[in-house]
Amino acid sequence: MAATTQTTATVKDVEQYKYGFVTDIETERAPKGLNEDIIRFISAKKDEPAWMLEWRLKAYRYWLTLADEEPTWAKLHYPRIDYQDSYYYAAPKQQAKYESLDQVDPKLLETYKKLGIPLLEQQMLAGVAVDAVFDSVSVATTYKKKLQELGVIFSPISEAVKTHPDLVKKYLGSVVPYSDNFFATLNSAVFTDGSFVYIPKGLRCPMELSTYFRINEKNTGQFERTLIIADEGSYVSYLEGCTAPQRDENQLHAAVVELIALDDAEIKYSTVQNWYPGDENGKGGIYNFVTKRAACRGRNSKVMWTQVETGSAITWKYPSCILQGDGSSGEFYSVAITNNHQQADTGTKMIHIGKNTKSRIISKGISAGKSSNTYRGLVRVQGKADRARNYTQCDSLLIGDKCSANTVPYIESRSPTATTEHEATTSKISEDQLFYCLQRGMTQEEAVSLIVNGFCKEVLQTLPMEFAVEAQKLVAISLEGSVG
Amino acid sequence: MAASLISAHPFGEAYAAKAGTASGGRWAELQRAARAEIARGLPGPQHEEWRFTPLTALARVGFIPAAAADDVDVTTVPSDVPRIEGATRVVLVNGVYRADLSDTATDIEIASFAPNDATGQIALAELPLVALNTAYVTGGVTIAAKRPTTRTVHLISIGASGSQPLAFHPRIVVTAAAGASLTVVETHIGLPGQPFFANTVIEVDVAEDATVRRYVAVIEDGDAFHIATSGVAVAARGTYESFHLGLGGHRASGTVRQEIHARLNGEAARVQLGGVYALGGESHHDFTTVITHHAPGASSQQLFKGVLDGKSHGVYQGRVQVLQTAQKTDARQLHKALFLTAGPEVDVKPELEIAADDVQCAHGATTGSIDPDHLFFLAARGIDEPTARGLLVEGFVADALSQVSDETARDALQQQVTAWLRKRGGAL
C-alpha cells in the first residue's frame, strides 16, 4: 500500500516538470561564440598550466577540420546547431571556497533543496560525498578531507589539473582521445569542469561518490569532463545525476567521461539523467551528446555502467567498455524512457580484446507519446579474445501508436572460441496485466508505472539504493500523460 | 557521401558501349538514369549497407558484358544438375533465357524477360545494384501463373566465362495470380574458368491467397560474384517462402550476397525466409533482408544459420520495419553462426524499427563454436570425433532446413549440405 500512496503523491507533485525553475544568481560568463580567444579565456579563468591550454587548442584546431562531420548516423532529427550562438563559459560569481555549508550562498542551497540534494542531511544520513557542479564551477565539496585521509583524490578536474598534473597528463584523453568524435573533440577544447577521481591501490572506497550536474545559466553549453582512475585492486562507485531548469531554447550538453580500471579494479558508474526534455509539443529541451568510455586495462578489471535516461530532448550516448585486460568484464544496464517528442539513440559498445573477457548488456527502452527510442550497440570480439563471452538483451516497450522503438545491434566476431548471444523483443503493455492492476483499484497511470517499473527491474536494481528510489519515481514521472 | 563511392569500376562508358541500349519508351529512360547513377560509382566501404561486403574486389576485375563475349558456348546443362521430377526446367546461360534447353508448360507462362510498364515496380530502383541491373539488363525470364494452379519450376542459371571475366545482369520476374501456387527451385552454378559476376534482380509478386516458394542453391567453388536482389510484394493472405543455401568450397574465394526486400502489403500476409551458408576457403556470404510490414495482422519469420571454416566471412544484416498501420504484426528473426576453426569472421546486424504498439517482434543472434560437452556426449557413445562434429554441424543447420515445406526440395538441400561437409573430410 505504501508504494501506491507514494506513487500517487509523486504523480501529483510532478504534474509539471518539477525541476523547472531558474535560480537567480549573478553569473560571470564569456562572450557568445567559439574561437581560440574563448578557449584561452576559459583556460585563464581556470588558471590552467600551459600544457592544458595547448591540449585544448590542439583539440579546437582539429574540431575546425570536422566542420562537416557532425555525426548523422543516429536516428535523431534536430535543427543544425549553431555552435557560435552559445556561451562556453559561465561561473557563479561568488568564487570563494567554503569550509562549511554556512558560507554557501543560501540561494544556491535552496536550489539544491528543490533538486533533492540534501547536502546538510546527506552528510549525516547517506554518507554520500557530493561534488556539485553548478553550471561549470564546483562550489561545494563535502567529505573531501575524509577521503583525503584515505588517499582518495576526489576533486573538480580544474583543480586536479593543478594539484595532480602528472595523473591528469597521463590519463586525460587516454580513453577518449581529443580526436575521437565531433562532440568529444568539442568537449576537449572547451570543457569547463567535471570530476576527477583517483582511488589508490587496494582501497575499497567506503562511500559512494556523487556529482550533480545542473545547467543553470541560460544558453550555456555544458561541457563536463570526468576522469576516474581505479588503481590496482581498488573499488569505487560513482553516481551522476542531472536535472535542469525549464527553458524554451535548446541547450547543448556534450560531456566526456573516461574511466580507467587497472588490475583487479572495479568501477561502478551510475547515472540518472533527467535533463529538461522539452514540453509536450517538443519545444525546448536539452541536446545531450555524451561520450562515455571505460578502459578495462588491467587483468580481471571490471566496469559496470548503469543508466536511467528519462530526460533530454535528444540523447546521443553510448557508454562503452574496452576490455583489454585478460579476464576483464564490462556490464551495461540501461533504462531509456522517451515521451512526447523526445528522441533517444543510446546503447553501448563492448570491445573484447583480452582473453576470457566477459560482457553483459541489458537494455530496456520505453517509448510513449510521439517519441523515438533507439538502442544502438556494438559487440566486437577481436581474434585474440579467446573464450570471450557476451550476452545481450534488449527489450522495448511501446505505449501508444505514435511512438517508435528501434534496435540496431552490431555483432562482429572474429574469435572461434567466443560466444555471443543477442536477444531483443518489442511489445506493448499486456492487457491482462493492466486489467489485473485496475481490478485491484489502481488507476491506469499507477498501473502503467508499476508494470513499467517491473519491466525495468533488472536494471533499476543494479543502482545504489538512494538512486534506485529516485529512479523508480522518475519512471512514473516520465510517463506522465502517456496513457488514458 | 561522394567519398563513400568506388569511382573506378568496370561498368563505365567502355562497358556501356559494348552492352548496347534498350529501345525507346519508359525502360530506355530508366536505363539512362541508372547508367548515370552507376557512372558516379559503386557503394564503397563507408556505405552502411555494404560495410561488411565491400565491392572493392569486384571493382578491380575487368568485366566485359557477357553478350560481348564470342568465345562462350554452352550447349547442355551440366550432368551433375539433377532433374527434378514433375518440375518444368527453365535454363539461363549467362543471364539469357535459353528456350532450347528449357521445357515448356501449359498452365503457366514462361518467356524471355522483356521490360514492360510494370517492370521495376517491385524491385527497389534506388538500390545501387538494382540500378546496375537496370542499366545493363541482359534478359532473364518471366514466370507467370495467371490462374490458380500448382506448379514447380526448376530454374537453372549457368555462369560461364571465356577468356575474359564476364558480367551479366538478368532479371527474373515471378508472378502468382490470386490462388496460384508456384514453387521455384533455383540452382546457380558456375562453369570452371575466369570469374564471372551475376547481378540478378528477382521481382516476385504474390497476389491474394497466392503462394510463391523459392528454394535457391548457390554452389560455388571458384571466385565468382553472385549478387541477387529480390524484391517481393505479398498481398492479403498471400505467402512468400524462401530458402537460400550458399555453399562456398574449401578452395573458393567467391562472394555471394542474397539481398531480400519483402513488403507485406495485405492483411494476414506471410513471409518466411530461411537460409544456410556453409563456407570454406576465403568465401564470403551475405544475407541482407529488409522486411516491411505495411498491413495489419501479417507475420514474418526469419531463420538463418551459418557454418564457417577456413578464412571465410559470413554476414547477416536483417531489418524489420513495422509501420504504424501494421498493428498485430508478428515478426521474428534469428541468426546463428558456428565457427569450425580460428580464422573466419562473422558480422551480424539484426535491426528492428517498430512504429506500431500492438505487435510482437523479436530477434536473436548468436555466435559460437561446437560445444565440447556435446562432443564428449557423442564420444562416450563410441562416435569418433570427425563423425561427431559432422553430426553436430548437420544438427545445427537442421532446424533451418526443416522449415522448408517442400519435402523433395528439403531432401535435395540436405544432401548438398552433407556433400559440403564430406568434402571437408576428416578435418572437421
Image: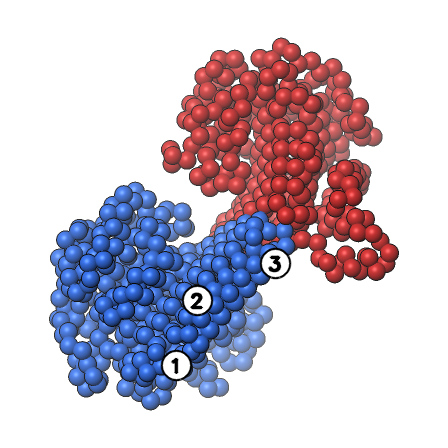
Residue A261's tag is 2
Percent position of residue A345, x then y: 41, 56
Left/right placement of residue A408 relative to residue A422 reads left
> Given the image, on which type of amino acid does mark 1 rest?
Met
Residue A387's tag is 3
User: Which residue occupies 74% across, 15% down?
Assistant: B75
Among the two numbered marks 1 and 2 on one chain, the one whose residue lies closer to the N terminus = 1
Relative height, residue B346 to residue A127 (above, below): above
Residue A207's tag is 1
Nearest-to-viewer mark from 1 and 2: 2
State the hue of chain B.
Answer: red
Locate the N terminus of chain B by quadrant.
top left
Same subunit, tags 1 and 2: yes
Among the two numbered marks 3 and 2 on one chain, the one whose residue lies closer to the N terminus = 2
| Chain containing the residue with disc 3 | A
> Given the image, on which type of amino acid does mark 3 rest?
Arg
- The colour scheme applied to this rendered structure is by chain
Left/right placement of residue A131 relative to residue B185 reads left
| Chain containing the residue with disc 1 | A
Letter of the blue chain: A
**3D distance between C-alphas at marks 3 and 2:** 21 Å
Q: Are marks 1 and 3 in contact (CB under 8 Å)?
A: no
User: Which residue occupies 20% across, 78% down?
Assistant: A108
Nearer to the camera, A205 or B208:
A205
User: Which residue occupies 75% across, 32% down?
Assistant: B152
Among the two numbered marks 1 and 3 on one chain, the one whose residue lies closer to the N terminus = 1
